[in-house]
Amino acid sequence: MKRRPSPSAAVLTVTTALLLTACGSGDGKSSGNDRIAGTGQEARAPKGPSEPSATSAEAKPDGADVSLPKDMHLVFDWDKPRGKNEAAAMDDAANYIRAIYRGVDQRTTEETALIAYSRGDGLKYAKTQIHVRLEGDWTATGTRRHYQGTTRSAPNGNSVEVAFCVDSSKFYGKDIKTKKIRRTEPSISDFDYFRIVMVRLPTGEGLWQASKVYVEAKAAQCR
């Protein structure tokens, strides 16, 4: 059964701080810019969409399209938790990341999937990431690997922190106009450690939204 998003519904406030110690920890500050953002500016209107990517039923887990072009691979190499809530929160954390790159591909910060899978600071972070690429007239290509995923639930069961490592050593920027790929030499800058606080949407059947994003850049523990 597909879960359906309810973007207009009120979301429960996170009342419990979730700080994981596994795989390292960040600085405790919500991040609006990591190594690929480069700015804390609020996103502005898009410059125009690119050709739409193919869509399948599997690419719309909550009725929101998170399909990506064939040259943009997001790999989620982690084990799903046994707990129902934590498993659902981890799935939607992955969909949140997909939604960001869906926005990059479609050249818009108003992608429907972003409304389904994020709110508050989580939405602001996503729009910032997309906006940087719109401003620079570039998109992404290659493989971005997400691994060492862990979860931790708040006592009230309404929020889950999903933490994971990211390897972007084979994920590059691509110029929209020239199609030139901006390849870089592998380095510690390719590794980041993410902590995303996912909040359950009260009226959505199993739908979770990213409300906070914390990023530790140059994460040595992820190499």
Image (tube, rainbow, N blue to C red):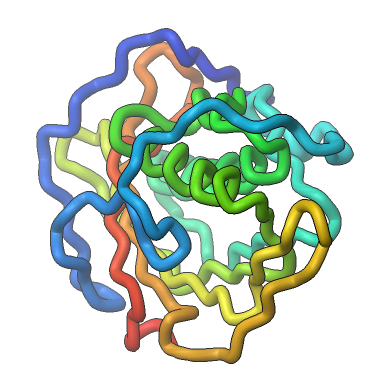
Q: Quadrant of the N terminus?
A: top right
- Res 123 quadrant in image: top left
| Residue at image location 41% in from the left, 67% down from the top | 35
- Res 181 quadrant in image: bottom right
| Residue at image location 38% in from the left, 43% down from the top | 125
Residue 15 visible from this viewpoint: yes
Foreground of the two, 219 or 56: 219
| Residue at image location 53% in from the left, 49% down from the top | 97
> From the viewer's perspective, is residue 137 above or below residue 170?
above
| Residue at image location 33% in from the left, 72% down from the top | 217
Foreground of the two, 22 or 171: 171
Foreground of the two, 184 or 124: 184
Residue 85 picture location, percent across and down = 39, 40
Q: Quadrant of the C terminus?
A: bottom left
- The answer to whether residue 207 is left or right of residue 105 is left
Residue 155 picture location, percent across and down = 15, 40
- The answer to whether residue 114 is left or right of residue 119 is right
Residue 208 picture location, percent across and down = 43, 32
Residue 184 picture location, percent across and down = 61, 84
> From the viewer's perspective, is residue 2 above or below residue 171?
above
- Res 158 quadrant in image: top left
Foreground of the two, 32 or 48: 48
Numbered label tally: 0
> From the viewer's perspective, is residue 49 above or below residue 74?
above
Residue 91 visible from this viewpoint: no
